[in-house]
Amino acid sequence: MELHVNGQTRALPEAAADPAMPLLWALRDGLNLTGTKFGCGIAACGACTVHVDGQAVRSCVTPLGSVVGKTLTTIEGLGAADHPHALQLAWLAEQVPQCGYCQSGMLMAAAALLARNPDPSDADIDAAMTNLCRCGTYPRVRAAIKQAAKGRKP
């Protein structure tokens, strides 16, 4: 089975190619893309958020078979060290991460929001950002999203 992930076509090892397997495990165990985290396993926390054809999805409950032929983006594909995504820069400038566990999912959810709504209101951000953060950095998340939306430099 092949997946189109982060701009590349990647072959999954046979052991990680069960169509019923959650996408999360195919990414982490099959392709060694470990930036996407396991949090709850029931799509409640959002630590496992990735993009499927540009839409934020919870990979812990998304069957692998449902994404074949679609374009996948994980946190590893959001930006590059020499060209970080605007959200990654804003995340640092606003000091969003505390423990950091939820951050890859938060960034992926925020990137999907900005892709469909380049100037979100507070209500838009609150509606889109359903990811959970035990550290409670939600005000910083909102500030970082607004900073990235406005294109302000940190």
Image (tube, grey):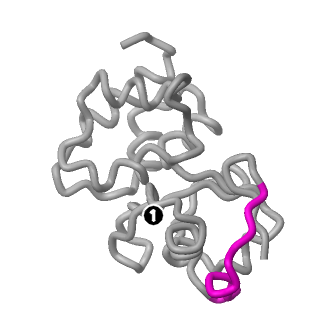
Q: Three-letter amino acid code at disc 1?
A: Cys
Residue 42 vs 112, above or below: the answer is below
Q: Position of residue 54 (x, y in %)?
A: 68, 49
Q: Is residue 45 left or right of residue 128?
A: left
Q: Position of residue 138 (x, y in %)?
A: 26, 42
Give yes or no for residue 11 being in the magenta stretch.
yes
Give yes or no for residue 80 being in the magenta stretch.
no
Q: Which residue of the protein is positioned furthest toward the right in this rendering?
A: 69
Quarter of the rendering containing residue 133: bottom left
What residue sits 47% from the left and 23% below the top?
A: 148
Instruction: Identify the residue under disc 1.
Output: 48
Query: The residue tagged with tag 1: helix, strand or loop?
Result: loop
Q: Is residue 38 left or right of residue 96?
A: right
What residue sits 50% from the left and 25% below the top?
A: 86
On the rendered image, what quadrant is the C terminus found in? top left
Q: Which residue of the protein is positioned furthest toward the top in this rendering?
A: 153
Quarter of the rendering containing residue 27: bottom right
The range drawn in magenta is 9-20
Q: Position of residue 130 (x, y in %)?
A: 39, 56
What residue sits 53% from the left and 78% below the top?
A: 61
What residue sits 40% from the left and 63% below the top?
A: 37
Residue 105 vs 115, above or below: the answer is below
- The image shows a total of numbered marks equal to 1
